[in-house]
Image (cartoon, helix red, strand yellow):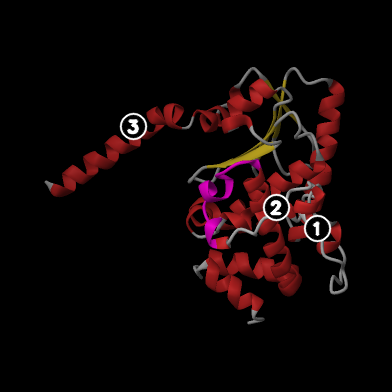
């Protein structure tokens, strides 16, 4: 009887989850149905490793520009990671109203959504038709593809996820951090605080930026300071371990080593 009860429980859960998804995660549900939506159409590019869907209202010029920006962003990601494993579906919403429907809150220029079973979606808003924005979101997808939903949620701190994406986002960082073969003499990046003229505030401890709520909680200034803290830390670490260290980190975590242990071990050169 106990075994039969467990079977019934999991069967009920299996049936209930699809029914609850539209209510609990409407934005993700819409992304999942974008391939069947009459409001979007797929644009094909033989050089792209991602399926791309754009709103039917986009102009030919917007569509052509977006495709060119996607190709440039993908090339940047390939240079940074050495290859591309991410396969997220890209969804371009040139109107804010559509962006809000597909990206919870509708804030920023783009957002990333992933599922426990491995599907991923990158939603780009009105300000997302930009190489830097697309590269930023593609970097999130690359980490997701290499480590999976569970490890990203349970092991990888948000400061690392965001700090890494900022290194390929040249709105906030310099290509010199990793594009040049030898960065030992590179001048450190101008801080986000200076660039956006924020008043001096103490940096946020990394232990306060572990979860998504930790990172994005607070006012605009606090969120920008969180980005500053994450960018500074990941840049510092990457300068020490170089890009092979990043690949070694993802491989170690994928094999079961705790993120914090692998992160510190590689920094020590072990």
Q: Earlier in the sequence, mark 1 or mark 3?
A: 3
Task: Please give the label number shown on residue 165.
Answer: 2
User: Toward which corner of the image does residue 53 lie, by quadrant?
Assistant: top right
Is residue 216 part of the magenta span, yes or no?
yes
Percent position of residue 246, x then y: 68, 66
Q: Is residue 171 left or right of residue 106?
A: right
Q: Which residues are magenta?
A: 207-220
Q: Earlier in the sequence, mark 2 or mark 1?
A: 1
Dot 3 surroundings within 10 Å: few (below 14), some, or many (20 or more)?
Answer: few
Q: Secondary structure at mark 2?
A: helix
Dot 2 surroundings within 10 Å: few (below 14), some, or many (20 or more)?
Answer: many
User: Toward which corner of the image does residue 133 lie, by quadrant?
Assistant: top right
Percent position of residue 139, x then y: 69, 51
- Residue in the picture at 81% in, 33% down: 66
Residue highlighted by disc 3 = 16
Task: Please give the label number shown on residue 79.
Answer: 1
Q: Secondary structure at mark 1?
A: helix
- Residue in the picture at 78% in, 56% down: 191
Tell me if residue 162 comes above or below residue 94 in the rendering.
Answer: below
Task: Report the mark closest to the observer, 2 or 1.
Answer: 2
- Residue in the picture at 67% in, 52% down: 225
In depth, the one of 11 and 115 nearer the eye is 115
Percent position of residue 9, x then y: 24, 40
Q: CA distance from mark 1 to mark 3?
A: 43 Å
């Amino acid at each position: 009887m106990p075994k039969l009860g467990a079977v019934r429980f999991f069967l009920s859960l299996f049936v209930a989850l699809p029914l609850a998804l539209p209510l609990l995660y409407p934005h993700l549900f819409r992304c999942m149905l974008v391939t069947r939506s009459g409001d979007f159409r797929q644009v094909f590019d033989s050089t792209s490793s991602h399926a791309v869907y754009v709103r039917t209202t986009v102009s030919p010029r917007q569509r052509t520009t977006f495709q060119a920006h996607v190709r440039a962003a993908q090339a940047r990601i390939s240079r940074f990671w050495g290859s591309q494993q991410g396969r997220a579906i890209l969804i371009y919403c040139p109107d804010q109203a559509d962006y809000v429907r597909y990206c919870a809150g509708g804030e920023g220029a783009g957002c990333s959504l992933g599922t426990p079973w491995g599907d991923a979606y990158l939603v780009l808003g009105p300000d997302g038709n930009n190489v830097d924005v697309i590269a930023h979101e593609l970097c999130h997808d690359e980490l997701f593809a290499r480590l999976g939903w569970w490890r990203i949620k349970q092991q990888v701190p948000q400061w690392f996820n965001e700090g890494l994406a900022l290194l390929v986002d040249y709105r906030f960082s310099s290509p010199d951090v990793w594009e040049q073969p030898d960065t030992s003499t590179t001048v450190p990046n101008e801080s986000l605080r200076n660039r956006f003229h924020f008043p001096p505030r103490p940096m946020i401890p990394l232990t306060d930026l572990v979860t998504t709520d930790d990172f994005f909680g607070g006012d605009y200034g606090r969120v920008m300071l969180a980005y500053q803290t994450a960018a500074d830390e990941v840049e510092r670490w990457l300068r020490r371990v170089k890009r092979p260290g990043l690949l070694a980190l993802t491989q170690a975590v994928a094999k079961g080593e705790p993120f914090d242990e692998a992160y510190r071990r590689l920094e020590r050169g072990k």
